[in-house]
Image (cartoon, grey):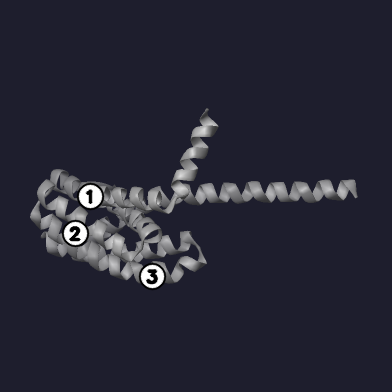
């Protein structure tokens, strides 16, 4: 039963439309949650004596979701999802945060697309990490300025550390899964070679 459900889920995810729809929905939700959490809780500690806007932890995840949308549905879909998320944020969070998100995510989106698209052929992991770094730096400065938060060395560093934790939380498990998968394939390959040598 479990294997059947797993197989069905994998087939559905491999469908371009399903993957595009789910990733776009998650991206919109990520943008909204980022703004609502920031409006509700203000600053959160992120370690090392630093603090960042509460939504920063979700912003790092949102950057990864943006890459998934771009890959599954294209650049226009990613920008459309961003617009929807910011529009909803204007009502659920505050107009100031929504405006800051439009400016920050929008500019970071354009820069990220250039980085992610160029590096994607060299592997998803490399492209996602590089694009997240570029997006995080640009997003941090623009968001703090437009939203009215102080732009200081401490606030900028806190934002970057928070986004770094969030990126690791998402990319880390994916990297671990891929390494485990590679190790499994390598073990099977070595075993096959060994068996062939014994039979020979």
Q: In this view, does 13 lie above or below 79?
A: above
In this view of the protein, can residue 149 be seen by the observer?
Answer: no
Of pointers 1 and 3, the one earlier in the residue sequence: 1
173 or 144, which lies in front? 173
Image side of residue 109 versus residue 191, left or right: left
In space, the residues marked 2 and 1 are separated at their CA atoms by: 9 Å
Please name the residue that numbered disc 1 is placed on: 34
Residue at 31 percent across and 70 percent down: it is 111
Q: Badge 2, how many Cα within 10 Å: few under 14, some, many 20+?
A: many
Please name the residue that numbered disc 3 is placed on: 115
Question: Does the CB distance between marks 2 and 3 fall below 8 Å?
Answer: no
As drawn, the label of residue 101 is 2
Image side of residue 184 versus residue 68, left or right: right
121 or 157, which lies in front? 121
Question: Does the CB distance between marks 2 and 1 fall below 8 Å?
Answer: yes
In space, the residues marked 2 and 3 are separated at their CA atoms by: 20 Å
Image side of residue 113 versus residue 152, left or right: right
Residue 21 place in picture, x, y as percent: 34, 50
Residue 199 place in picture, x, y as percent: 89, 46
Residue at 54 percent across and 50 percent down: it is 178
Residue 195 place in picture, x, y as percent: 82, 46
* Helix, strand or loop at mark 3: helix
Question: Does the CB distance between marks 1 and 3 fall below 8 Å?
Answer: no
Residue 154 place in picture, x, y as percent: 22, 59
């Amino acid at each position: 039963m479990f294997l059947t459900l797993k197989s069905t889920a994998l087939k559905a995810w491999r469908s371009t439309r399903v993957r595009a729809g789910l990733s776009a929905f998650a991206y919109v939700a990520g943008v909204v949650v980022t703004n609502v959490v920031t409006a509700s809780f203000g600053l959160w500690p992120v370690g090392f004596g630093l603090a960042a806007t509460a939504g920063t932890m979700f912003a790092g995840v949102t950057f990864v979701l943006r890459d998934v949308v771009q890959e599954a549905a294209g650049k226009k879909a990613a920008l459309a999802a961003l617009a929807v998320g910011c529009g909803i944020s204007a009502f659920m969070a505050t107009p100031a945060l929504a405006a800051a998100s439009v400016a920050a995510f929008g500019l970071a989106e354009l820069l990220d697309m250039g980085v992610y698209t160029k590096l994607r052929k060299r592997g998803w992991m490399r492209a996602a990490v590089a694009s997240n770094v570029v997006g995080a730096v640009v997003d941090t400065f623009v968001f703090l300025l437009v939203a009215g938060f102080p732009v200081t060395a401490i606030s900028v560093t806190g934002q970057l550390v928070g986004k770094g934790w969030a990126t690791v939380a998402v990319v880390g498990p994916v990297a671990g899964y891929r390494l485990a998968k590679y190790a499994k394939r390598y073990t099977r390959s070595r075993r096959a070679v060994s068996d062939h040598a014994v039979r020979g």
